[in-house]
Image: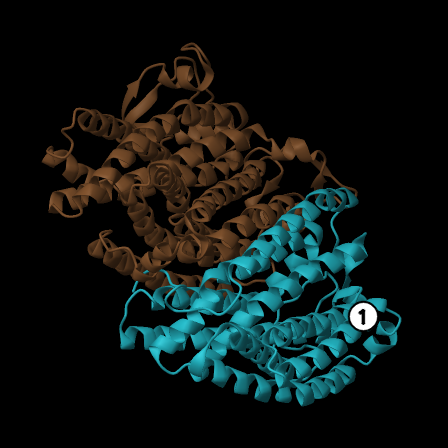
Amino acid sequence: MNLSDPAFWSRLQFGFTLTYHYLFPQLTMGLAWFLVYWKWRALWTGNEKYNQAARFWAKIFGLNFAVGVVTGIPMEFQFGTNWADFSRYAGGVIGQTLGMEGMFAFFLESAFIGALIWGEKRLGQRYHFLAAVAVAVGSWLSAYFILVTNAFMQHPVGYQIDADRLLGIGSLSAYLLNPWAWVQFAHNQMAALVTGSFVVAGLGAFYTLRRVHLTQAQLYLRAGTFAGLIASVLVAFPTGDQQAKMVGRHQPVTLAAMEGKFVGGPIAGVAVIGQPNLEARRLDNPIEVPGALSFLAYGTFQSYVHGLEEYPKDLWPDNIELLYYSFHLMITLGTLFIILMAYATFQNWRGRLRSTTWLLWVLMLAFPYPYIANTLGWMTAELGRQPWLIYGLFRTHDGYSKVVSSGNTVFTLIGFTGLYFVLGLLFLSLAGREIARGPDLEVPASLQEKEALV
Amino acid sequence: MIATWYGIVSLMLIIYVVLDGRNFGAGMLHWFVAKTPEQRRQVVAAIGPLWTWHEVWLVGFGGTLLAVFPRLMASAFAGYYLALFLILWGLILRGISLEVAGHINDRLWQGYWDFIFMFSNFLLAILFGAAAGNLARGVPLDAHGEFSMAFFTSFSVRGNVGLLDWYTVSVAIFAAVLLAAHGATYLTLKTQGLVHNRSTRAAKVLWAAVAPLFIVISVESWLVRPDLLGRAIYNPFWWLGLLIAAVSSMTLISGLSTRREMRAFLSSNFLIVGLLTTGGAAIFPVMLYSTLSPANSLTAYAVASSPSALRLAFIWWPVGFALAITYFVFISRRYAGKVSAKQDNQGFY
């Protein structure tokens, strides 16, 4: 890591702005289906408490969505500003899905977000429900297109190298239906649903512990823990499992680095604890489950797992320590999520969740961890892809903008740091305000008038 | 095919400018036409539900540009580095100040964010205007088709130019006045009471200022790029743009003087479409003109994707565009008419 290398600063800026940005869409994508569910229940049962829940969460959603939009636009721009040589080389391929994301997903999402947040009074209940569906579908579609783009960088398929030695599309269907994209989409969307569920359940626990808004809190707890259990299980199995198998098949050196395996062999274990030591090329203080990695990655305990030593060093991911910890902490958190949500769902089914104070405390305090796990998952994917920008085709170091000096990138990185710090403060304080005020606001007077007229 | 894609990409940028331009204009003016927080909430209600829908046209434009003209995006975005980040930061401030102002019903809080909102919209109009000026004047492209541009050099329009010089600054001022006039016309249509009356007056004054400024920058453009006119007169789209601009100026004047607000607003949209079409047709086929040597200029033909990529984009783009038009119809019907702070709010107060 050379601090005078412009590529380093462009990577840091992209990594920082993307990590920050993704804190918001993961909640958008998770929460969107809760809004759809509550709007649907309200239409179906006519019970106003569901509308109240939807109206309350729509405020948090709107704030979250706005920060997501404004922090998302710099991502697309940076392809051109900081990664010009990558854009020149691969624009004909990745531009297709970035364009589709705009045309098919963002247009749908943004056309109806206003209707969802501002438009209940103008639209009426049925259209308002449809607006929630449109926003949810749009946000998940946008995830698909961006994940196809990322999957191409992880496992390039469907491309051709044109006469000018730049990339073009060979087969659009192969590119759009990249098996890597499907697995990553399933895994990533379940992870977003975990975030949404933990936030909803956590707020339910908060209100229950404070003995306020109890009817609403009960709704949040029930929906949050149940969806949280399903999503936590699905994120590990089958989606996470398939994702790891995909890495084992197409990026064996990445798998070795994720597990800190320097020497290959059969009956390879999974380290529960251990610190990778690159100087000595071994895992320090390892506690391993023997054979687990062979089984998980390739299906039998006898399967051979490649070690880092088998590859030249310039094919190793360039930050093995961080990659190893990202992967292991993500797995640890994912396991804890399943245990927590399974027990909470069980207690809720027995009708004892509301009275189990310690469990409510844990649920209330657990909401940041899915954000951390999502971030770690993306760090695993992106650090694991190094040193390639497009795996096996194009190196990260070849992709940055040669005309942009380190000085310019450091300047904009400082700007983003300051601006995003302020954004974070604003988001937390305003979301905190809405949470403190709570969902029990009376139905707005103007809405009552309208209903009286109808 | 490449000329068609040039047209499509220009169309998306024009739609963006027309749609978000009204927000820039209304945002710049709201500080002056709406004096109390309550009046300002009326302006916010006219912009609020739709600004993300307007802003994503920029994202759709960027994605399409990357797919069909990747080498242009690479050269231009890296070259305009600092200016683009100022635009990004302006967009962040614009969106956030609009969203958060309504959350707390407090004079100080709303006053602060209303000011930031006005300031960021003004900054954006100026920066987009300067960017348009740069496209017309050219940038210091080297023989590899790359450039790295300072904010300002000698304020000259030839040779090693900077982002700002007498020409690009005039275009920026013209853009700010034009978008302010556009925004005032929009507010006239959407608001009631005092805000409406002030907007009506502002629209007349601003449109009256647009006319002489237009003549000034036309002459300046001819001085800066004397080569353009000779080619442009053979381009039917250049004539079409002029025709649209001329007709919509007539209907705009009639709309403003007879208080037909919808007519005035539609004309204002089409006037901008006409002006940008004229500009886009005049510089075609050069997408980035080199001030160092015309041989370094990047034409649409030189920066386009491979034919396979262009053909594929032809499959999905029309579908996406048709869907966008459908949403547009839905939105226009749902949000037609004047806004009221009572009906159009986020439910915070």
Q: Is residue A285 above or below residue A224?
A: above
Image coords of residue B119 (percent x, y): 45, 77
Which colour style is shown? Answer: by chain
Could one spot residue B153 in this view of the protein?
no
The front one of A362 and A215 is A215
Q: Is residue B333 at all visible to an observer of this figure?
A: yes
B203 vs A302, nearest the viewer: B203
For badge 1, the amino acid type reads Leu
Question: Number of numbered discs present?
Answer: 1
Where on the picture, by quarter, is residue B21?
Answer: bottom right
Q: Residue at x 64, y 34 (%)?
A: A175
Left or right: A441 in relation to B312: left
Q: Is residue A172 left or right of residue A40?
A: right
Q: Colour of chain A?
A: brown
Q: Residue A300: x percent and y percent? A: 43, 10
| B132 w.r.t. A24: above or below | below
Kind of element beneath mark 1? helix
Judge by depth and name the residue closer to the eye, B154 or A260. B154
Provide residue B77's location: percent of width, then percent of height: 61, 62
| Residue drawn at (52%, 44%) of the image | A142
x and y, in percent, of residue B256 in the image: 62, 83
Which residue occupies the extreme front position in the image? A453
Q: Which residue is mark 1?
A: B240
Tag 1, which chain?
B
**Residue located 23% across and 30% down the image:** A340
Characterize the local packing of mark 1: few (<14), some (14-19) or many (20 or more) Cα atoms within 10 angstroms: some
- Report which colour depicts chain B: cyan
